[in-house]
Image (spheres, rainbow, N blue to C red):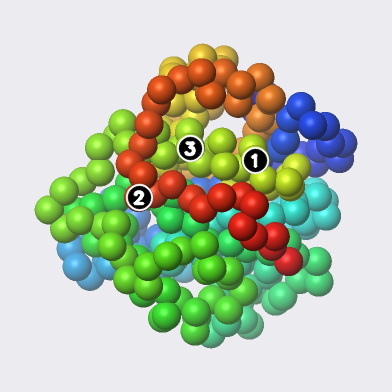
Amino acid sequence: MELCGVQTLRFSSPNFKTLRLVRHAQGIHNVAIEKGELTALSGKLFDARLSQTGIQQVSNMRKEISKSGLLNTVQLVITSPLRRAMQTSVGIFRGQEDTNQSDIFPKVNHSPPIVALEICRERMGLYPCDKRESIGTYRTCFSEVDFTMIESDEDTLWQAEEREDMEDVSARGLHFLKWLWERPEKDIAVVSHGIFLQQTLRALHEKVGTPVEDNHLKRFANCELRSIRLEKSDMEAYTLTTYNSRKYVSPPSTSIHTFE
């Protein structure tokens, strides 16, 4: 697996695909917790939105990927269904934060489909900032996002009394990579979260045996993008493992939907 910076890979091969991993931009929970204004247990941080700094980070990243040519190569965007991740994905790849604030990020002409999946959301449970709003509410705010692969309108995965085990986060990260590998698209962007992305790469390294440099195993910064070349050999090695995650976060079959 090759990890690189923001660059365009214009060739394709059945032996690898390119993933653009993006952590959401700065959220209000990041600011409030860092400053000690609120704790992670505060209900005021429910489904945390982007901060003003986060909005500017999205705008800057949108300019970067437009300049680099990534908008012409990314075929599909997968996003966590938490508000801050969808604001980031829509702002970067559709040119607007959400339909209620379309003047913040003017819409771009070329844009790949954006699909929400539960399996790539942040570590679940206990913290209100990691609990999502209902899909019915989201549909009115994020009409650019495809929610057809999310089964429950309400957030049935988040548990108030229990924080998801790190091993489960890592396991669903590997299952997510396998799902991405089985998709027909060769260049896919993923907008997710710090813990999920870090645990996914660590599991790929530690559980599957894929060589990954130490600096790439560190936490993503807000709105950081890392381009990853996932090799066929990585997925062949993964199929030999018995590393299982909870079934309730497994995504539907890749053959169910063709996104447009």
The local secondary structure at tag 1 comes to helix
Quadrant where the C terminus lies?
Answer: bottom right
* Closest to the observer, 251 or 177: 251
* Closest to the observer, 210 or 150: 150
Q: Badge 2 is on which residue? A: 248
Do callouts 3 and 2 mark residues in contact (Cβ within 8 Å)? no
Count of numbered badges drawn on the protein: 3
The local secondary structure at tag 3 comes to helix
Quadrant where the N terminus lies?
Answer: top right
Do callouts 1 and 3 mark residues in contact (Cβ within 8 Å)? no
User: What amino acid is found at the position of numbered circle 3 in the picture?
Assistant: His
Which residue lies at the image location 76% right of the left edge and 27% below the top edge? 15
In the drawing, does residue 127 fall left or right of residue 147?
A: left
Q: Residue furthest left?
A: 161
Q: CA distance from mark 2 to mark 1?
A: 19 Å
Q: Which mark is residue 175?
A: 3
In the drawing, does residue 139 fall left or right of residue 92?
A: left
Q: Badge 1 is on which residue? A: 182
In the drawing, does residue 55 fall left or right of residue 114?
A: left
The local secondary structure at tag 2 comes to helix
Badge 3: residue crowd in 10 Å (few <14, some 14–19, many ≥20): many
When the figure is inspected, residue 20 is found, relative to residue 53, above or below; the finding is above
Which residue lies at the image location 25% right of the left edge and 37% below the top edge? 165
User: What amino acid is found at the position of numbered circle 1 in the picture?
Assistant: Glu
Do callouts 2 and 1 mark residues in contact (Cβ within 8 Å)? no
Which of disc 3 and disc 1 is earlier in sequence?
3
When the figure is inspected, residue 162 is found, relative to residue 240, above or below; the finding is below
